[in-house]
Amino acid sequence: MWAYEKRLEYPINIKRRDLKMAKVMLEQYGGGQSELAATLRYLNQRYTMPDEKGKNLLSDIATEEMAHIEMIATIIYQLTKGATIEELKEAGFDTNYAGHGLDLFPTDANGYIFNATYFAAVGDPVANLYEDMAAEQKARAIYENLINLATDPDVIAPLQFLRQREIVHFTRFKELCEEYEKKGYGKK
Amino acid sequence: MNDYYDFISKDFNDKTKAIEYEDVNSLDFYPRAYNVTDEMFKQEIAFPQDIQDTMGLYDLNNIMNNNMKENCGMYDVEEGFIRGNMFPTLFDPYKKLQLKMPSVENEKESLMLEIQKIGFAAKDINLYLDVHPNDNCMIQKFSKYIERLNTLTNEYEQKFGPITLSTPNQSLNDVPWAWNETLSPWERRNK
């Protein structure tokens, strides 16, 4: 089960509103390689892991990804809080505001709604781990895109942190996958 | 063009190549508003010893300096936190961006930052131990960091109110309920 700590994993204090940045940040909130997709992917794959190593790794990384969802949400919240109608219209965020106000809602940067086809759990530990590795790489690349788009250092710092976390997660999945392949867990 | 494709397909655990970033990764492409002057930006950022040492080396023994040996081959808590990575062999910076510790303005934020640092260090060791359960050095480190995390959390909660509901906390005996008195963590510093 999960316990909640009323703190962020990494501090976020954004001083300036930037609705265009908020719009593209949605990609990591509800998009194909978002932290939300990662959480659900790992939580659903952990049941067929052949030993406690795999189950623990997936549970623990999923827990950290939940903290990352919170960080992305915080970034979007702080980038949009107190926005005026003119600012919303100018940034193209009005389409988001129409359906959700300034609430958060999982869509990607283009407004396409989150759905469970973004992740898979196929019942084979090696296949699942290869998907996890690919997902972490894609998330890293998307964080690089977001860093390229950002101009505010208060936004770039947490993005750098999150990008580095994806690299570490990738490495752990890779190490586990190599071990499972050596032990022959990939074949049923 | 070839260098660009090398960048896309590189195995970023392969530190045998010092990759020269070109095209999309050139300095002209990158937005400048990151608190550094042009001159600073174009200089090689001097990372601490570890990055130069890890180029082309996988063997942990070769890259460990004295500090790292005490830390089981990891960065210490501060260096690990600003990188988002406790492990020198895994650290992969993006575009020579500068690393800096988040700023704090008062005691509450300072104590919270300490909690975040040590909590992060423990989490990263946690993930490592899931895959390498026989590393005694790391196991001792994890317990030590968790103990420190508890101490810091208790100190924070005594002064500034509860941040967890799963540890004993005097302030939860107060009326009105102290859990409602602490701010949710997504609020800005100056609301």
Image: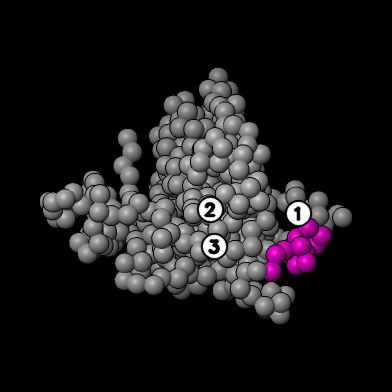
Q: Name which residue lies at 71% across and 80% down.
A: B39
Rendered position, A91 above or below A179: below
Neighbor class of circle 1 (other Cα within 10 Å; few <14, some 14-19, many 20+) is: some
Per the rendered image, the range of residues in magenta is B19-32
Which residue in the protein does label 3 denote? A16
Q: Name which residue lies at 36% across and 66% down.
A: B109
Q: Is residue A183 visible?
A: no
Q: Which residue type carries mark 3?
A: Arg
Q: Which chain carries label 2?
A: A
Query: Tags 1 and 2 in contact by the CB under 8 Å rule?
Result: no
Of badges 3 and 2, the one in the foreground is 2
Q: Name which residue lies at 47% across and 67% down.
A: B102
Q: Which chain carries label 1?
A: B
Q: Which residue type carries mark 2?
A: Ala
Q: Name which residue lies at 79% across and 53% down.
A: B6
Q: Is residue B100 visible?
A: yes
Rendered position, B56 above or below B67: above
Of badges 1 and 2, the one in the foreground is 2
Which residue in the protein does label 2 denote? A83
Which residue in the protein does label 1 denote? B7
Q: List x then y, in percent, for residue A27.
A: 61, 43
Q: List x then y, in percent, for residue B90.
A: 57, 56
Give the image quarter of residue B43: bottom right
The answer to whether A151 appears left or right of B19 in the picture is left
Give me the C-alpha separation between circle 1 and circle 2: 39 Å
